[in-house]
Image (tube, rainbow, N blue to C red):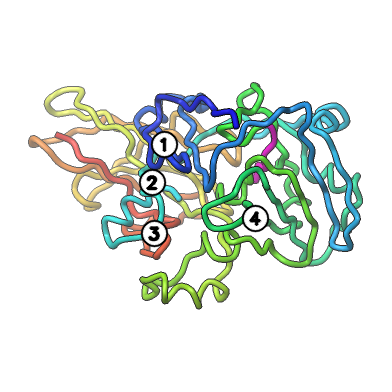
């Protein structure tokens, strides 16, 4: 198996399988994230494919199927473009199970590919009605907890959002193997666990994917479930995650002078709204200062923000909170769960 050239700008969280992220301070310098700063999340080895022989199977529950080559997708369908974070912080409160991601597991990318709604409509795999699921599978490699990687999303999401893509471009370049090339799923507004890389099979079904990563991972269990033994009987009782919550991160703090700080960061919206404002505090939330939004592009982009903030004394902590278009505010504390997912307590960074 060919080995992909991993970026040297990422901090490696685990070598096998390869999981790595950039510094958040590097991320916020670019409105659109360069490929070398895009995090890598894997549950098995990264696979390098020959694009000329890559194909996708679309299957119905009755067994009928259709096969499309990567060239079919590029030639026959119009191209369309659209544009477990902070687990380490949750783990500081109480141990969690999973890679200790910091705040660099995010990217703002221009994707290019084929709208999945176009593929399914022409393919006739299923009528667009009822509570159907679109299941994605990648048999590229064995995974840590299953024989393949699988996930699913409601068909309703595909019907209502033409930006759900089978993507083969990232930032106008061919999609690299490290990021799921030659073909991956892109589901704006959904967490990355549903964005299946190296996708080779799509099944329209009345049931969610039965895969481990859909049924027994990426779920928010209540705080009292604090061991794997307790969790084993609870996975089926809680829904699979779709979207992540309103969140913000303080990515960079530096001194402009003895009495002035430059603070930069990013914010991301919850599932149904957008980011309206980001505020920062250096007195643990007693007073808040509104930041300047320097980048926000469309419904699905992140929000970059910055502020020059007066300070006194030699050191302290800067906190951030995002506020959405419905007036909801990011909570001070994120709720703990055993998998360390969806942490969204105030962003924070120390300065001295």
Instruction: Look at the numbered discs 4 and 3 and tell me whether their residues touch, using CB distance below 8 Å.
Output: no
Mark positioned earlier in the residue sequence (2 or 1) = 1
Residue 18 visible in rendering: yes
Q: Residue at x 59, y 41 (%)?
A: 300
Q: Residue 74: image x %, image y %?
A: 81, 28
Q: What residue sits 42% from the left and 30% below the top? A: 27
Q: Which label belongs to residue 21?
A: 1
Q: Which tag, 4 or 1, sits closer to the chain's start?
A: 1
**Discs 2/3, front:** 3
Q: Is residue 21 left or right of residue 118?
A: left
Q: Nearer the viewer, mark 1 or mark 3?
A: 3
Q: Are marks 2 and 4 in contact (CB under 8 Å)?
A: no
Classify residue 264 by image quadrant. top left
Q: In this picture, is 142 found above or below 350?
A: below
Q: Residue at x 53, y 71 (%)?
A: 235
Residue placed under numbered mark 4 in the picture: 151
């Amino acid at each position: 198996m060919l080995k992909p050239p991993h970026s040297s700008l990422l901090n490696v969280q685990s070598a096998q399988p390869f999981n790595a992220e950039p510094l958040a301070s590097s991320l916020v310098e670019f409105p659109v994230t360069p490929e070398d700063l895009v995090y890598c999340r894997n549950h098995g080895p990264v696979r390098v494919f020959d694009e000329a022989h890559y194909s996708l199977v679309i299957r119905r529950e009755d067994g009928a199927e259709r096969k499309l080559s990567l060239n079919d997708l590029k030639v026959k369908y119009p191209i369309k473009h659209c544009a477990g974070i902070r687990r380490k912080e949750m783990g500081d409160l109480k141990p969690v199970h999973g890679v200790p991601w910091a705040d660099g597991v995010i990217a703002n990318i221009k994707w290019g590919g084929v709208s999945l709604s176009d593929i399914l409509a022409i393919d006739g795999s299923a009528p667009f009605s009822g509570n159907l699921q679109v299941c994605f599978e990648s048999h590229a490699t064995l995974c840590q907890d299953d024989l393949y990687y699988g996930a699913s999303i409601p068909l309703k999401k595909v019907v209502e959002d033409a930006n759900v893509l089978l993507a083969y471009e990232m930032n106008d370049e061919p999609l690299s193997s490290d990021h799921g090339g030659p073909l991956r799923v892109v589901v704006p507004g959904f967490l990355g666990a549903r964005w299946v890389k190296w996708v080779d099979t799509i099944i329209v079904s009345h049931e969610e994917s039965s895969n481990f990563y859909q049924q027994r991972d990426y779920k928010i269990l209540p705080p009292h479930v604090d061991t794997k033994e307790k969790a084993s009987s609870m996975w089926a009782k809680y829904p699979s995650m779709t979207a992540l919550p309103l969140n913000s991160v303080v990515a960079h703090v530096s001194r402009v002078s003895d009495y002035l700080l430059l603070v930069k960061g990013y914010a991301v919206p919850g599932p149904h709204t957008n980011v309206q404002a980001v505020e920062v505090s250096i007195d643990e939330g007693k007073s808040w200062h509104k930041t300047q939004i320097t980048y926000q592009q469309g419904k699905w982009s992140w929000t970059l923000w910055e502020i020059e903030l007066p300070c006194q004394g030699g050191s302290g902590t800067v906190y951030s909170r995002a506020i959405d278009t419905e007036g909801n505010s990011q909570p001070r504390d994120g709720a703990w769960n055993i998998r360390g997912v969806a942490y969204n307590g105030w962003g924070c960074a120390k300065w001295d």
